[in-house]
Image (cartoon, rainbow, N blue to C red):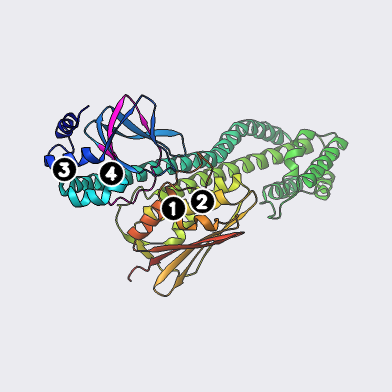
């Protein structure tokens, strides 16, 4: 291909074709033709890009690992420009740039950029606009993809959290049907027993004891097994139905009370009385568990609604950071449980509200807490706290992980930089956190050493 042919091809180029021929001649004089076959790699993540690429034919695409698999995020066709651009601060691409079909590019090395900006003002102006559009595209795409990754992690955690109470409701409802039949049968037998007023008073006392709310201190599984065996032995000794021993063991009933009852009521009426009391206690316990599980589901739904602020406009408003941090902890509790991590939340009393976009603030806390949980080892600890300092509120998220290596401290807020294993992080979380903090008129800094990393977010207090 002759120089004139190449200039003619540049004159037909969609992006650069309208500039003066003298500038096109400059590009040809300082560039070289690079040909690629399908699958060839133009640049890799972590490797510096050192040239401007003017695509003459073919198609290129960048493939980025977002933490949930490699995805094709952008393409360049004939008529586009890519690679390093004048005034760009890009060091390396966020992924691997690969040829999707045979490609021809004109490569202008970065070492000529100073001359390019001096001798080719029209080309430079076009490339600056391309750089701005590219930055805008990557910013919006990165924010969108990071939100999708966070949403996927959040959905997985919430599905796990909701599964436990939902399964408990289903299990208890199935058992409840059998217990209601037991209760009806025991009630019929009790009615058939002719009891005196004194005996009915003893029955009422037994029922009150069985329906009394259990004492708060937890009983160990071994102690509970001992109680069940003791009740079973007592029932067998009195030739009564021993299948109710498990239910009686969960009540406040004691063997001395059973002895007093046996002295007042004889078999078979005693058997009907105990079955009736046990059935009533079982029904009450099951309905209580169903109610508690339903309340757990409701609280989780409330937390996720508060975390996402799905019913709020995306505008700045006074935000209660105590509720915001609590909702964040609730939706990420499953992840903390997976690592047996202890997460504590301390919020000053009478903490003033801050002014910000609630959904964005929650995303900040979510990203920082998730990073802290990723950093700690199994059984580690994370502390979240919020307090007033002057005319600001400071939120701190501190973990006892290994710390951030000194050599990378200056890069942790860079886009696509991650210290997590490949596929575990997108390298966008802290970059987005910093953007969101700035958007809410705040600031973020951190301190890190082995055994402790402390991120601090400062936000302005909302005016009264």
Say which element carries label 1: helix
Q: Earlier in the sequence, mark 4 or mark 1?
A: 4
Residue 239 appearing in the image: yes
Q: Nearer the viewer, mark 3 or mark 4?
A: 3
How far apart, in angstroms, are the residues tagged by discs 1 and 2? 9 Å
- Packing grade of label 1 (10 A; few <14, some 14-19, many >=20) is many
Which residue position is annotated with label 3?
23
Instruction: Give yes or no for contact between labels 1 and 2 (Cβ–Cβ under 8 Å).
Output: yes
Q: Nearer the viewer, mark 1 or mark 3?
A: 3
> Where residue 134 is drawn, which disc sits there?
4
Left/right placement of residue 10 relative to residue 368 reads: left
Q: Nearer the viewer, mark 2 or mark 4?
A: 4
* Range of residues picked out in magenta: 81-108
Say which element carries label 3: helix
Which residue position is annotated with label 1?
430
* Coordinates of residue 15 in the picture (x, y in percent): 18, 38
């Amino acid at each position: 291909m002759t120089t004139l042919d190449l200039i003619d091809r540049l004159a037909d180029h969609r992006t650069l074709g309208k500039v003066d021929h003298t500038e096109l001649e400059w590009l040809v004089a300082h560039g070289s033709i690079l040909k690629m076959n399908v699958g060839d790699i133009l640049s890799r993540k972590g490797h510096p890009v050192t040239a401007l690429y003017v695509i003459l034919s073919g198609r290129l695409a960048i493939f980025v690992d977002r933490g949930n698999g490699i995805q094709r995020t952008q393409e360049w066709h004939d008529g586009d420009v890519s690679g390093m651009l004048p005034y760009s601060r890009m060091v390396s691409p966020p992924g691997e740039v690969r040829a999707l079909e045979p490609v021809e590019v004109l490569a202008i090395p970065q070492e000529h950029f100073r001359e390019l900006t001096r001798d080719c003002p029209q080309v430079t102006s076009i490339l600056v606009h391309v750089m701005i559009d590219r930055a805008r595209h990557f910013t919006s795409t990165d924010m969108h993809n990071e939100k999708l990754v966070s949403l996927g992690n959040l959905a997985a955690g919430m599905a796990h959290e909701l599964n436990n109470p939902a399964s408990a409701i289903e299990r208890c409802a199935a058992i409840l049907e059998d217990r209601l039949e037991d209760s009806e049968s025991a009630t019929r037998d009790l009615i058939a027993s002719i009891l005196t007023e004194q005996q009915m008073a003893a029955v009422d006392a037994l029922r009150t004891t069985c329906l009394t709310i259990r004492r708060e201190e937890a009983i160990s599984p071994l102690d509970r097994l001992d109680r069940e065996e003791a009740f079973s032995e007592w029932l067998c000794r009195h030739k009564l139905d021993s299948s109710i021993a498990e239910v009686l063991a969960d009540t406040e009933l004691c063997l001395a009370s059973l002895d007093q009852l046996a002295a007042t009521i004889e078999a078979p009426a005693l058997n009907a009385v105990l079955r009736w009391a046990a059935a009533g206690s079982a029904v009450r316990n099951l309905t209580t568990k169903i109610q508690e599980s339903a309340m757990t589901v409701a609280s989780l739904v409330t937390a996720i609604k508060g975390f996402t602020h799905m019913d709020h406009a995306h505008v700045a408003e006074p935000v209660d950071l105590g509720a915001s941090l609590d909702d964040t902890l609730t939706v990420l509790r499953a992840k903390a449980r997976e690592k047996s991590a202890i997460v504590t939340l301390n919020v000053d009393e009478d903490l003033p509200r801050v002014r910000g976009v609630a959904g964005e603030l929650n995303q900040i806390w979510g990203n920082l807490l998730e990073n802290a949980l990723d950093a700690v080892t199994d059984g580690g600890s994370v502390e979240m706290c919020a307090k007033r300092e002057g005319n600001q509120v400071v939120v701190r998220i501190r973990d006892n992980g290994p710390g951030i290596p000194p050599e990378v401290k200056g890069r942790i807020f860079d886009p696509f930089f991650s210290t997590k294993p490949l596929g575990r992080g997108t390298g966008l979380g802290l970059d987005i956190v910093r953007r969101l903090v700035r958007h809410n008129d705040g600031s973020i800094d951190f301190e890190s050493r082995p055994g402790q990393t402390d991120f601090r977010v400062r936000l302005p207090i909302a005016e009264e």
